[in-house]
Image: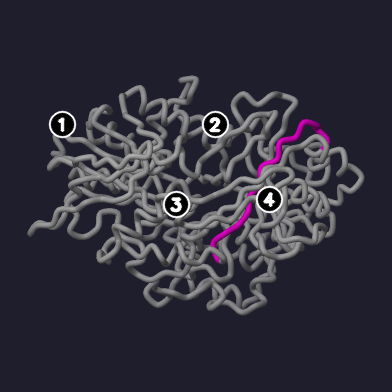
Amino acid sequence: MTHRIANDDTAIFLVGAGIASLAAAAFLIRDGDIPGPMITILEESGKIGGSLDAAGTPESGYSMRGGRMLESKYLCTYELFSSIPTLDMSQTVTQEIFEWNTTMKTSSKSRLFRDGHRVDAPRFGLSEKHILAIERLELEPEGLLERTRISDQFDASFFETDFWFMWCTTFAFQPWHSAVEFKRYLVRFTHMVSGFNTLTGIMRTVYNQYDSMVRPLQKWLQERGVKFQMNTRVTDLRLRHDSAGYAVEHIVCERGGRIEEIEVGARDKVILTLGSMTEASTLGSMDSAPELNGKSNGGSWNLWQKIAAGRPQFGHPANFTDHIDQSKWVSFTTTLHDPAFFRLIGDLTGNVPGEGGLITFPQSSWLASIVLPHQPHFIGQPADVSVFWGYGLSVDKLGDFVKKPMSACTGREIMTEVMGHLRLDADAKKILETCTCIPCMMPFITSQFLPRTKGDRPQVVPEGSNNLAFVGQFCEIPEDVVFTVEYSIRSAQIAVYSLLGLNRKPPAVYKGTHDPRVLLKAFLTLHEVHALA
């Protein structure tokens, strides 16, 4: 029999309105029988969705900071969205995603683009030494890898292979990032190695993830009476300590220029999204570059820093906030009012929009990539408007066609650089006259990849907690990988089931490494034995 600590009058406060909090609210209602009106989401901005954002108009240009790729083994994500109808109520979001990816299968004919030409199904180019290092890393205990970097595990030649170019741009890794996280990715996505050079197995939503996932989830929550308090910045949690541990007693907020305190009752629960990989993001324009901000330009990092002071069980936020030079990069969203660019890319790559996935320019000093999704990418997007997204990893290096760092470039200059790598000189002037490119600087976008040790990320329910849980990208979930929607949703599921005392667990993380067929296929692929793979 399921035991519930919470009663029907239990109030739940969720700090942050990203996908982790939205998922937690849904699990509270669906699995915890908490009435929607007893759930309050506190959000410092005026928008929900967190990093899964999308906004704009055809006239001013669309923008989105990023787009998370999905795959079939995101079990928590699909389990949640199997209960959430699409906006038109025709099916569940999970059904829509799987049906869409049956129709629009990712199969890249141009994963890399080099010397003005596509590279169809690039070879990995790994030496036996590289493969042995990968296999050793997959087996090595995490405790022996703490604080080490990927570059500590491989020689310099590894970072010149096409395997690395595809890996680092698919997942946004840098050589100085965590060897532990790299190991987790190798293990978590072993089943995808055989299709890695064509992105086979990557799944997408019909529209951007804000329209396809966040909006249906928000609608479902609002229909059930969940309260959203926007423009409310949580600045502190006041804790009560006793022999049984500790509990949140008050939530300190800033709203409309006033400081307020929300009392947290004895039966109430608090679920806090820790940190933010898109905190302090700024947008540029066609003729202005985005500014670089820091942790003081937002509330999430400051809140974590404040509550963690003197409480090691709450983690160490400075590990993730104080290395912006190692965690920042620039993305950009381009709105096109002329079909020429999409037509030319189709001719160059052999893929229709939505089929090809990420196109990387390995010769780019910025290590730039673009992706042309199926159109329309936004609900309500006019038929004569197209949208694509891209990003660069090495944003402080001079461009190859625009002799400026990407971080200092306007949208016009970023488009000029991209078209230079595509060799679209003859069409560049017309494309620039009919597009709007909006760059976005994200100082903390890969901060969750920074080298870490045990304790830097707190447990979802920290030791001694009676009513507080952490969710999002900066809590610790063994075996799963950050920078995914799945990680946030899994953290929400763990938090809800633990705080409510439910006799339930999230679906186990898929382990392809336990399947000999998956291991054999990956082994043969790494060795480029395609005839047998």
What percent of the width, then of the height, locates residue 521? Answer: 56, 60
Q: How many marks?
A: 4
Q: Secondary structure at mark 2?
A: helix
Q: Residues within 10 Å of mark 4 (few under 14, many from 20)?
A: many
**Which quarter of the rendered picture does the C terminus lie within?**
bottom right
Q: Nearer the viewer, mark 4 or mark 1?
A: 4
Instruction: Say which residue label 4 marks.
Output: 289
Please tell me the numbered disc located at residue 493: none
Distance in Å between CA atoms under marks 4 and 1: 50 Å
Please tell me the numbered disc located at residue 99: 2
Distance in Å between CA atoms under marks 4 and 3: 22 Å
Question: Which amino acid type corresponds to the residue marked 1 in the rendered image?
Answer: Asp
| Residue closer to the observer: 210 or 278 | 278
Question: Which amino acid type corresponds to the residue marked 4 in the rendered image?
Answer: Ala
Q: Nearer the viewer, mark 4 or mark 3?
A: 4
Instruction: Say which residue label 1 marks.
Output: 9
Left or right: 189 in relation to 84: right
Identify the mark nearer the N-term, 4 or 3. Answer: 3
Identify the mark nearer the N-term, 3 or 1. Answer: 1
Q: Nearer the viewer, mark 1 or mark 2?
A: 1
The boundaries of the magenta stretch are 326-340
